[in-house]
Amino acid sequence: MSHTHARPADAGAGTPPRPNAVVAVLALAGIVVALMQTLVIPIVPELPRLLDAPASDAAWAVTATLLAAAVATPVVGRLGDMFGKRRMLLLSIVLLVSGSVVCALADSLVPMIIGRGLQGLAAAVIPLGISIMRDVLPAERLAGSTALMSASLGVGGALGLPAAAFIADNWNWHLLFWTSAALGALSFLLVLAVVPESTVRSGGRFDLVGSLGLSTGLVSLLLAVSKGADWGWTSGTTLGLFAAAVVILAAWGRYELKAKQPLVDLRTTARPQVLFTNLASVALGFSMFAMSLVLPQLLQLPEQTGYGLGKSMMTVGLVLAPQGLVMMAMSAVSAGLTKAKGPKVTLMAGALIVAAGYGLSIVLMSEVWHLVLVSCVIGGGVGFTYGAMPALIMGAVPESETAAANSLNTLMRSLGTSFASALAGVILAQMTTDFGGYALPSENGFKVVMAIGAGAALLAFVLASFIPKRRTAVPTADAGGGDSTPTDSTPADGAPADGAPADGAPADGAPADGAPADSARADAGAAVKA
């Protein structure tokens, strides 16, 4: 995010967009990205055998996607603001298809890691899609459309799991990746045919030093978090990576504050509306992952444990699938609440619903229908929060910075899921029960993780309460290319500048970018633990 001025693109949309078609195609692209993450879950336990590699090495097929997505999300978002969101969306889909083909042809570990890394580079599709919606859709359509686009992440993840399990059980595992490639190619063609390019771009010089600094810091942090359990939390490698992350990110922040055209405008990020939305996103990302980790394990553990349900991966997918449908249905309700009360209220309501779902799970986890109910309640709350966060972000940043800002928000959620994975892994490794000579996570261990998930959702509620009711002025581009000037304060709860409505719709077709697939990464991480 930088202070460069927005300028019209050289080639704008030649004809008015068809809103319904644009929303449908972008949502499909988001679902395909989520599917890409979910498709690998049924074969994660079999990867060491399939790739003829040790389990610790095979896990890099998941870790590579996590790291690539963390690096790509803020960088691609900024490039979308500068050079065109549709262009970067298409490039992301090409990387998805390329990675899928590489994985489909792979029979060893190295090409699988390369392919999964390429797939991870497509993680910015959802934030880019949200940003395109802000640019090309009528203001009255924006709240519902961005909520649906955000929900596509969970929808794809939930619906993809049973489909992936069915394919893995009945055909060669390579078909999973051929399916991903085919769906990606279809999305590419539909975006090319239906979605217009944004007419608002910031231009300017890309912050290469800033992007390298942020990428190095994030990779160090996420490597330490994701591999700490394997390497040892007190090992020299883990502690060294944590220390490197602190030093590199601190130096990066200092550099960004001095840069004329930074990758991430930290002054914009420090605005209360952006800051507390991002902090709430970390807490919600943490909270969401607890369910993704616990429910599949409860469903698959043997019934003889006294709390496991002894179900197959196919059943796990079918149990979690309704959650995606509820999330999609709640996107419309979320949009209505946002229009009536503002996205701050929607975010707080969603956080409370998520906390209530986790509260239910502590007392209802002994039957399949219990877990269906719990996942649907949590999914409904997530649908509320996913719709509110982009509206809050877009209401607090200039038009030319929305893609980068939304991408950063998505990154915050991803960091939350990574932290949750590490903490839950430690808890479940310590709270075990003996079963036939094997140490399995205990029932109380699962309850503790779910209770922490509820606490994280309540923390998100508290953080969201600090979001200002009336947002501060934000800079807008001066038409003549002069210095940026602030607009007058506008009604809050995420209402954008220039008189746009309180539901987060931008004025004058301003652009916005969204954020990558955290839940998808969370699902893949859950599979590793399951």
Image (cartoon, helix red, strand yellow):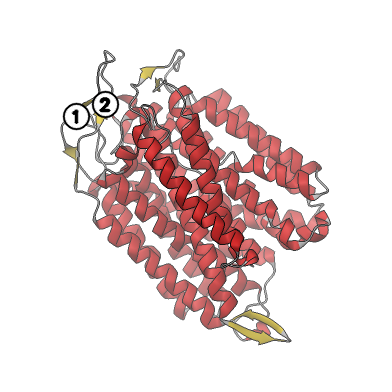
- Residue 476 has which mark? 2
Q: Which residue is located at x 46 percent, y 35 percent?
A: 210
> Which image quarter: residue 302?
bottom right
Please state which of residues 3 and 297 is positioned toward the viewer in this rendering.
3
- Residue 487 has which mark? 1
438 in relation to 355, above or below: below
306 in relation to 57, above or below: below
Name the residue type under label 1: Thr
Q: Which residue is located at x 59 percent, y 74 percent?
A: 298
Tell me the element at label 1: loop
Mark 2 surroundings within 10 Å by alpha-carbon count, few (fewer than 14), some (14 through 19), many (20 or more): many
- Residue 369 has which mark? none
Q: Which residue is located at x 48 percent, y 53 percent?
A: 415
Tell me the element at label 2: strand
Q: Are marks 1 and 2 in contact (CB under 8 Å)?
A: yes
Please state which of residues 50 and 498 is positioned toward the viewer in this rendering.
50
